[in-house]
Image (cartoon, helix red, strand yellow):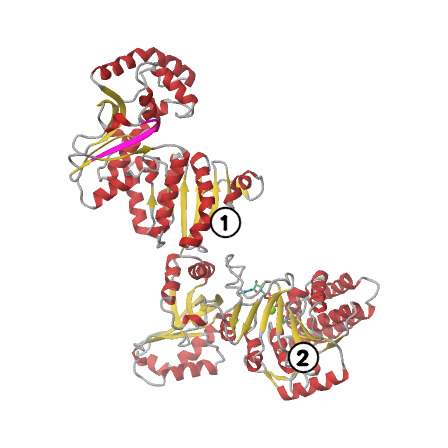
Amino acid sequence: MSWIAHKFGGTSLADADAYRAVTRIIESSGHLKQAVIVSATAGMTDGLIELVSRAGRRDSTTEELAEVLQARQVALVESLLGEAGPHDLIARIYKDFADIEDVLRASSVMGTALENAIAAVAGFGEVWSARLLTTHLSRAGMSAAMLDAREVLVVTPAETTPVVDWETSASNLGSWLAENDHDVVVITGFIASDPTGAPTTLGRNGSDYSASIFGSLLEVGELIIWTDVDGVMSADPRLVPQAQVLDDLSYDEAMELAYFGARVIHPATMTPAIRRGIPVTIRNTFNPSAPGTRIAPRSHSEMPVKGFASISDMALVNLEGTAMIGVPGISERLFGSLRQAGVSVVMISQGSSEHSICFAVPESQADAARTAVEGAFAAERQRGLLQDLEVTVGCTILAAVGDGMSGTPGIAARLFGSLVRAGVNVKAIAQGSSERNISVVIDGADAARALRAAHAGFYLSRQTLSIGLIGPGHVGGTLLDQMARRLESLVEDFGVDLRVRAIASSSSMVLDEHRIDLERWRERFGEAGAGTMPTDLDLLADYVHTESVPHAAIIDCTANADVAMRYGDWLAKGIHVITPNKKANSGPIDYYRTLQESARRADAHYFYETTVGAALPVIQTLRDLVQTGDEVHRIEGVFSGTLSYLFNSFDGSTPFSEIVRAARDKGYTEPDPREDLSGMDVARKVVILSREMGVEASLEDMVIEGLIPAGLEEGSVEDFLDRLADHDQEMLRVVEEARSSGKVLRFVGIIDPEAGCRVSLRSYDADHPFARIRLTDNIVTFQTARYSENPLVVQGPGAGPEVTAGGVFADLLRLANYLGATL
Ligand code: ADP
Ligand code: ASP
Ligand code: MG
C-alpha cells in the first residue's frame, strides 16, 4: 500500500480554523495511507525554550509564562472541539505542564538551562498538536492514530544535523505499524530519541526533516510540506514584495536556497528525499488550489537564477599578509583552528594572489574566530608577516541560486549591475565552481534593498520603470489614458513594463506597491481612503525610487515652479525626469546648469521635448543639428498656440478684443488671457531653445514686447476684456498697415545668437511659411549653415492635451530606449 506524507508547519496549526483547513486537506487527499507530520502551533516552541532559559536564570516571570502557554494550548483545544467533549485532552495538557514544572524547578536549582532540559521540554508543542489533530480527524470519521516519534525515531545528535539510525528506526516503525493499522498516522515532528532512549530534537525548524525521514521510512510517493505561502518564492515575500512563486526547483537549488535563509524549507529535508528521489512539494494550507512548488531531481524551468536568499548577523573576517603567499597548508591551519574552536564557516573567498583570505562566520562566533586564528598564526604575526585580523560585524550574505547559472555568461554582471544601481557596496564575493550559487557579503543595513534590486535585475524586464506622475489634469490625465491603452503591447512586443506606482495632484496622492490600474485610475484617485493620502512629494519620490524595480521616473505634468525646483534632487538620486513644465528650464540659469550636471553625474535622463511646441520635434531637431556640428544662425517661430490662433483669425473685420473674448470662451486661452498676451510663455520657450544651443539666455535680459496695453496689467479678467476694446483701433491700424503692404501679423519668438533674443508682434510676407499656418499651429524655422538658402521648418498643432500628452509619452518611450529597449 503506498503512502503519502504531509507536513503541516506551525502556521498551519495556529488556530481552530487552520486545523479545519488541515482536516479538509487530509480528507480530500484521495490517498488511503497518509502520514501527517505536525509542528507545534506557531510560537509554542519558542515559548517552551524560553521557559527553560528563564528557569535557568531563576527569572521570577517563569511561572507566569508557563500559565500563558498552558492557557493558549487549552484555548486552542476548546475552540476547535468545543468546551464539552475533550476533557481528557485538556487534563493531559495540565499533566504535561506539571511535568514541565518539574524540569523547570530542576533548572532553577541548577541555575542553568541544560541541553537535556531543553530537549525534554521543547517538543511538547508537537505532542499537543498531534493529539489534537488525531482527535479532530477521528471525530471527522477518519481512521487516525497518533505516533509519538520518540517511540520509533532514533538519532544521534551531531554538530549540525542529527544522524538517523535508519535500521533501528525502520524496525521500530515496522513494529508500531503492525500493531496500529490506521489510514492516517499523525506523527510528531521535531522530536526523536537518542540512542540511550532520552528525548532529543532535530534542531529548530526540524519538522521538515522529520517529515522527510518518515517519508523515506514509509517509502512515500510524495512529500507535501504545507505552509502559509503558495510555494517557494523567488525571495522572502516579506522583504521583496515582487517575489514570485516558483513552479519547480531541483533538489540542489532548494538546498542552496534553504541554506541561505529561505525559511520556507529546511535544508536537512533534502537529504533523505534525495536518497530516495522522493519529490517534495511546498503548498499553501490556506490556498490548497494553488499547485505549489515541486522539488525534484531536476528542474524544468529555463530561468538561470531561481531565487535569492540571505543570512543576516554575519561577521566578515579578513586575514592578510605576505606569510600566505605560496605557502602550502595555510588554509588547512586556518580552517583547522576554526574547526577546533567550533566555529562554522559559511563562506570563503581567496584572491589568486594568495595575499589575503576572507571568510564569513556567524557574528556570535566572531570573537571565537578571532581568538582561534590569532592563536594559530601567533608566530607569523610576531614576525610581521601577517597583519592584524580584520573583523567586520553586521554583515549579511546574499545568495543568488540557480542551476542554470552555470554556462550562462553574464549572470554575475547582471547581479552586480543591479547592486551597483541600488548603491549597494559589495564587501566580498564567492562563487562555487558548481556555479549554482553566487554569494556576496554586504552591509546588513543594505540587505533588504540589495535583495529587492537583485531580484528586480533577474525577475523583471530590464526596461521596467517605476513611475510617479504629478499633475493628473488635462495633460497628465490624458497621458494616463493613453498609457492605459498601450501598456500590454509595450510589455509583449518590446519588454517595456511601465508601472505607474504613484499619482499626485496638488492636494492628494495615491501610492501602490505594484501598479495603479490605469483603466480605473480616476476612481482610485477619487475614492477617499482607498490608499489616497495628502500629497507629499518627498515621500512620493522615495516611493517611486524603489529598489524593487530597475528604473524610476517622475513625470511632472504641472506648470508649477515649486515642483520644477525638485528636479535637481530627483536627478541627483538617479530618478529620470520627464516634463512639459517650462519652469525649470526657463528659470535661473544656475539651476538649469545644476540639472544638466546632476543628470550627467547620476546617469539619469531628463526629457522635456514638450516644453516647446508640444509634441512637435523642436528640441530634438535642434539638438540633432547642434550635436552633428551644424551652425545654427537663427531660430524664429510661432511658439504659442493661443497667439497663433488669435492672429490667424484677426484680419481687421472683427475687433481684436472680440476675437480674444471668443477664443477665451472656446478654451483656447488661459482663463486669464493676459497670461498668453504678455508673451511670457513664448519668452520661456525662447529661453529654453537658446540654452539648448549653448547660449546662456535668461528671461531678464530678453526683449519682450507683449500685447497687454499699459495700465491693463492689473484688475479682473472681465474688466480687462472690456477695456481691451479701447485699444481695438490701435490694433486695427497695425493690421491694416500690414495688409496694405501684402503682409500678415504673427506673434513670434526669435533666437539669434548674434542679435539677441526677442519676443514681438511682426509682419510677414504672404508667401512666408508663417503666413500659411492655420488654427493653433506652431511653426519653427531653423536657419543654419546647412539649411541656409531655405530654412528647416517644423510645423503643426503645438498645443492641446492629446498632442502634448502624446509628446510626453514619446519622451517616456525614448527613455525606455535609452535604458536598452529596442522600440
Ligand atoms: P511553517 O510554520 O509552515 O514552518 P515558516 O514560517 O517556518 O512556516 O516558513 C514559511 C515562511 O517562510 C513564509 O511565510 C515566508 O514568510 C518565509 N520565507 C522566507 N523565504 C521564503 C521564500 N523564498 N519563499 C517562501 N517563503 C519564504
Ligand atoms: N516547532 C519546531 C520549531 O519551531 C519545529 C518546526 O516547526 O519545524 O523549531
Ligand atoms: Mg518552518
The circle drawn on residue 274 is none
**Residue 37 in view, yes or no:** yes
Q: CA distance from mark 2 to mark 1?
A: 47 Å
Please state which amino acid type lies under the numbered disc 2: Ser
Please report the bounds of the magenta region as a residue range: 774-782
- Secondary structure mostly seen in the magenta stretch: strand
- Left or right for 766, reference 114: left
Kindly identify which residue carries mark 1. 515
The circle drawn on residue 2 is 2
* Magenta stretch: includes residue 479: no
- Left or right for 533, reference 816: right
Indicate whether 817 appears above or below 43: above
Q: As rendered, which of 151 and 328 lies closer to the eye?
A: 151
CB within 8 Å, label 2 to label 1: no
Please state which amino acid type lies under the numbered disc 1: Arg
**Residue 108 in view, yes or no:** no
Indicate whether 686 appears above or below 223: above
- What's the residue at 55%, 40% (across, down)? 523
Nearer to us of marks 2 and 1 is 2
Q: Quadrant of the N terminus?
A: bottom right
Q: As rendered, which of 434 and 603 lies closer to the eye?
A: 434
Q: As rendered, which of 782 and 307 lies closer to the eye?
A: 782
Residue 584 location, x and y as percent?
34, 37
Residue 735 location, x and y as percent?
26, 16
Q: Judge the density around disc 2: few (<14), some (14-19), many (≥20) Cα neighbours within 10 Å.
A: few
**Displayed-image quarter of ligand 2:** bottom right
- What's the residue at 34%, 16% (across, down)? 656
Element marked by disc 1: loop
User: In the figure, residue 181 lies in which quadrant?
Assistant: bottom right
- What's the residue at 25%, 21% (across, down)? 744
